Amino acid sequence: MTCSASASGSIDERATLHRAIAASAIGNAAEWFDYGIYAYGVTYISTALFPGDVGEAVLFALATFAISFLVRPLGGVFWGSLGDRLGRKSVLALTILLMSGATLSVGLIPSYDSIGFWAPLILIVLRMIQGFSTGGEYGGAATFMAEYAPDESRGFYGSFLELGTLAGFSLGALLMLTFSLLLGDEVMHAWGWRIPFLIAAPMGLIGMYLRSRMEDTPVFRAHEASSEMKPSPGPGALMRRHWRPMLVVGGAVVALNVVNYTLLSYMPTYLQRRIGLSSDEALAVPLVGMLSMALFLPLAGHLSDRVGRRPMWRFSLIGLLLLVTPLYMLMGTGLVGACVGFILLGLLYVPQLATISATFPAMFPTSVRFAGFANAYNISTSIFGGTAPVVSSFLITLTGNELMPAFYMMGTCLVGLVALHFMPETAGRSLYDDPFAD
C-alpha cells in the first residue's frame, strides 16, 4: 500500500486528509476571490483608476488583468523549485500571504483623479505581485491535494480544490453584487467597489494558519527520506528531461483556461456590454451558473475515479466544440437564455474543472512534480488563459461579431483534443509511478 493510499485508513488519517483539503482549497478560494471581485467590479475599477471614456477604461482594466498572467511563469519557476526542494507546505504559506496582501492593497489605491497615472501604475504592480504569487499557489495547492489524496479517490478529493475556485469566485461576485444593490451605482463608483478587496486580508490569514499547522505531504516526506534531495532543475533542463508531460499539460491547459477565464472572468463584461443586460443581471447570471457547476464537481471527480480522466476530458471538449456557438446564441436572447446558456456551458466544462488536480500532478515524478506542473500550467495560462478576456473583447471589436468568443473557444478545444490524444490515463495509479515511462 502506498503512502497516499494509506490516507483512507484510520479516523485520524481521514481527519488529516480533510484538513489538507481545506488548507489547499482556501488558497484557491483566495486566488479566485480576487479574480471574482476584479472581474465583477471591472466597470467600477476602470472608471476609478484609469483615464479615458468607459469603453477605453474597461479595455485598459482587462489588459491589466492580463498583465498579471505574464509574470506567472516566473512565479512558477521560483516557487516550483522551492516547493520541490523545501516542501509544499512552506511555499503555500508564503504564496497565500502575498496574494491576499496584493488584493487588499488594490482596494487602497487612490483614484486616478487624485494621483493621476500613479493609480494604474500601482494597480499594474499589484497585479504582477498577484500573478507572481499565483504562479506558485495553484501548482502547489494541486500538488499538495494530489499527494495527500488516496490513489483510488484522487479525482473525488481533488474536485474540492475546484470547489474552492468556485466558492472564492462566487463569494467575490456575490459581495460585489450585494454592495451594488445596497449602495447603488453612484456610491459603488465613488468608493463601494473597494470594500470586497479589503476582505482578502482575513482570508489570507486563515489560509496561512491552516497551512502552517499541516505536515508536508506523505509522498514528499517519503521522497525526502528515501533519496538525496537535489535542486530542482531550471526550466530548460526541466523541459529537456520531461518535455512530454509538459507539452501535454500545456496543450490541455490551453483549452481548459480559455474556457475557464472566458466563462468566469469575461462573462459579466460580455453580458453587459455585448448582450445588453443590466449590470446587476450580468453579475447574477454567472453566479447562478457557478453555483450549478459546484453541485456537480464532486460527482464528476468521483466518476473520473471510476471511468478514468481521459473519457471525462473527451466528453467535455467534444461537447463544448459542438455546442458552444449555439449556447452563445441562446445567451444573446435575453436574461433567461443567458442563464440557461451559461449553466449548460458550465456543466460541459465541469468534467475538465473537476479533474485538474487529479490529472496534471500525476503526469510528473515526485522530484519535479511541483516545478513541472507549475511551469507547464503557468506558461500556457499566461499566454492563453489570462489573455482570454481581452482577446475576446478585441476580436469582437475587430470583426463586429458577438460570437467571436465562442469561435475562439472552439479553436482551443481542438488544441485540447490533440493534447488529450497523447495524455496517459492516471486514474488509480500511484504517484510513485511515472506514466510517461511506460
Image (tube, rainbow, N blue to C red):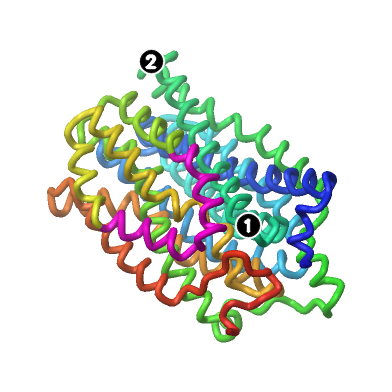
Q: Quadrant of residue 143?
A: bottom right
In this picture, residue 96 sits left or right of residue 48: right
Which structural element holds mark 1? Answer: helix
Give the residue at the far left of this rendering: 400
- Residue annotated with mark 1: 154
Q: Can the viewer see residue 35? A: yes
Residue type at tag 2: Gly
Q: Residue at x 51, y 80 (%)?
A: 244
- At horizontal 73% and vertical 50% (from top left) the residue drawn is 93
State the SS at label 2.
helix
CA gap, disc 2 and disc 1: 45 Å
Q: Which span is picked out in magenta?
A: 293-321
Which is more toward the observer, 144 or 41? 144
Name the residue at 55% across, 32% down. Answer: 197
User: What's under tag 1, amino acid-wise?
Assistant: Arg
Residue 140 in sight here: no
Q: Which mark is residue 245?
A: none
- Give the overall secondary structure of the magenta segment: helix
Residue that label 2 marks? 184
**Cβ atoms under marks 2 and 1 closer than 8 Å:** no
The picture places residue 107, in percent across and down from the top left corner, at: 53, 32
Identify which residue, 89 or 418, lies in the foreground.
Answer: 418
Name which residue lies at 73% across and 48% down.
Answer: 20
- Give whichever of discs 2 and 1 has the lower sequence position: 1
Where 250 sits versus 145, above or below?
A: below
Q: Position of residue 193 (x, y in %)?
A: 46, 27
